[in-house]
Amino acid sequence: MSYETDLLEVRETYPFDKWKTYAEIGEAGEEGLEQYTEENCEAAKLILDTLVSDLAALGGDAPKEDKLQKFQAAVEALNTLNDEIDDSLIETGEREELCELFNVIAVKAGIDPSEYGDGEGPTGEWRDW
């Protein structure tokens, strides 16, 4: 499998479709979580799509620093998106899902996540969530 194909396959594991279901009315009639609108989930998905596409375009042999710049841009874009939604889009469960997703992307991009963010992964370098 090629570097690019391996990266692009990560898109199949995104949690954003699941997040959209959080906005729906629950079975017991309780209110849904309004922050998980189609628009907000698609904005988060676009940020990750851009990261994956940018890393694929750089190529597997690109310097690690160039790849990390793409991670930084994505994490900072998620910081901004989360801030715009009153710090409610990325809660505990979503944070864990995103950190794991970023770590999977890092491995596929040839980066050892344990070397960044005090072992947490590249998100730990820049995330506010």
Image (tube, helix red, strand yellow):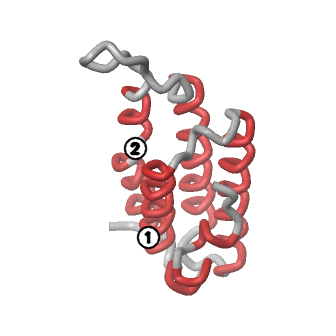
Residue 102 percent across, percent down from the top left: 50, 62
User: Which sits in the foreground, 87 or 66?
Assistant: 87
User: Which sits in the foreground, 66 or 105?
Assistant: 105
Of the two numbered discs 1 and 2 on the same chain, state the one appearing first in sequence. 2
Establish if 21 lies above or below 19: above
Q: What residue is shown with label 1?
A: 108
What residue is at 40 percent from the left and 29 percent from the top?
A: 22
Quarter of image, res 123: bottom right
Q: CA distance from mark 1 to mark 2?
A: 18 Å
On the picture, is 29 further left or further right than 55?
left
Q: Determine which of the numbered discs, if any, sits on residue 82 in the image.
A: none
User: Which sits in the foreground, 31 or 37?
Assistant: 31
User: Which sits in the foreground, 20 or 73?
Assistant: 20
Establish if 25 lies above or below 1: above
Q: What residue is shown with label 2?
A: 15
Establish if 74 lies above or below 3: above
Residue 13 percent across, percent down from the top left: 35, 49
Quarter of image, res 86: top right
| Kind of residue indicated by mark 2 | Pro
Tag 1–tag 2 contact (CB < 8 Å):
no
Residue 95 percent across, percent down from the top left: 51, 54
| Kind of residue indicated by mark 1 | Lys
Q: Residues within 10 Å of mark 2 (few under 14, many from 20)?
A: some
Establish if 5 lies above or below 24: below
* SS for callout 2: loop
Question: Which residue, as the protein is rendered here, is positioned at the far top?
Answer: 29
On the picture, is 105 further left or further right than 64?
left
What residue is at 61 percent from the left and 48 percent from the top?
A: 50
